[in-house]
Amino acid sequence: MRVLIAPDKFAGTLTAVQAAEAIAVGWRRQAPDDELDLAPMADGGPGFVDVLHAALEGTLSAVTVSGPHGTPVPAVVLRVGETAYVESAQAAGLHLVDGDPETATSRGVGELVLAAVEGGATTVVVGLGGTGTNDGGAGVLAALGATSDGVLDGGPAALPSVTGVDLAPARDRLAGVTLVAASDVDSPLTGLFGATKTFGPQKGIGEDRIAEVDGWLEGFAVATDRRTSLEKGAGAAGGIGYALLVLGATREPGIDLVCASVSLASRARQADLVVTGEGAFDFSSRAGKVPYGVAAVASEALRPCIALAGQVLIGSREMRALGIESAYSLVELVGEERALGAPADALADLAARVARTWSR
């Protein structure tokens, strides 16, 4: 039997590469004669560059950029031909925010883009997701040369000082460069479904602060480009999507970009079964996440798709609406303590059990 293994990361425990390897170890234990094809996946968030490097090879260049509170942090630029890939979470990830999220800046993401451009790339693809910043991408604009009558790189708390923004210097610096925003989020910058309301709480912005912070971003949009702030994806990565869009970026769902890069469709057609997975499998997985994207590819290839997850938080009806035949929970099998304490071994055990049902 031919099995395509295409999981996302298991956030906080396993990278996508580690998850794919763990599933393969367990599957081989139960079905050693099956032919396994490993295709680690990402949707633009953490692991985006690693997954693309594994698929496309290319050259990695180490750079140092500003973290959300100004502390230098390491990051990499992946260069494949004339195209560079960077990952916003490396410069502005949630794990890097060690202070007030209202003062966290996305400046380091702009520095990553600048490093890619100065390295000679003519196309820069920015993976959006997993960030801890919520500054409307103002820090990105500052790093790329935009000027203002206020402070652009002081986090959302500094945005009330901004009443006008000159984007011309940043656009000049990016002249001749194609920007691509790879995102799993359709949110506009502000409002009920915007960056702050939707993702602010998980970044540490208190419920009692949501309205004010959203108002700061609204004011920033008025000072910059109100119409673009309403576009899909402007709210991605705390508004980094907005900054890229006002600089002329095109938006592409991160999962679609990765699927194309790893030739997932052709690999699915050669498989008998597709296995995907992520840390928490719930209905939000429909919003451009890896399991939904992989399941869509499997459906096009007329192949069944199953999911292995840390937790399964939806019922069978919702699961099938996502294109998943069955989903299996790591926590239900081994308990939360082992799932977190020995995630690779636990995931291998789950894969071995699932192989009893699905391998023939």
Image (cartoon, rainbow, N blue to C red):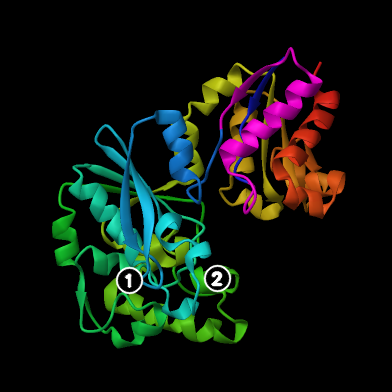
| 52 vs 110: above or below | above
Q: Position of residue 273 (x, y in %)?
A: 70, 23
**The N terminus is located in which quarter?**
top right
SS of the residue under disc 1: helix
Q: Earlier in the sequence, mark 1 or mark 2?
A: 1
Q: Position of residue 229 (x, y in %)?
A: 38, 68
Q: Most extreme residue toward the top, as rendered?
A: 33
**In-front residue for pair 185/333:** 333
The answer to whether 310 appears left or right of 90 in the picture is right
The answer to whether 4 appears left or right of 282 in the picture is left
Q: Position of residue 298 (x, y in %)?
A: 63, 29
Q: Is residue 26 in the magenta section? A: yes
Residue 1 — which label? Answer: none
Q: Position of residue 7 (x, y in %)?
A: 62, 37
Residue 265 shows in the view: yes
Q: Mark 1 points at which residue?
A: 138
Q: Is residue 73 in the magenta section? A: no
Q: Quadrant of residue 145?
A: bottom left
Report the residue at 28% width, 83% height from top.
162
Q: Which residue type carries mark 2?
A: Lys
Local packing at callout 1 (Cα closer than 10 Å; few below 14, some 14-19, many 20+) is many
Q: Mark 2 points at which residue?
A: 203
SS of the residue under disc 2: helix
Query: What's the magenta region?
Result: 10-39
Q: Disc 1 or disc 2, which is closer to the eye?
A: 2
**In-front residue for pair 225/235:** 235
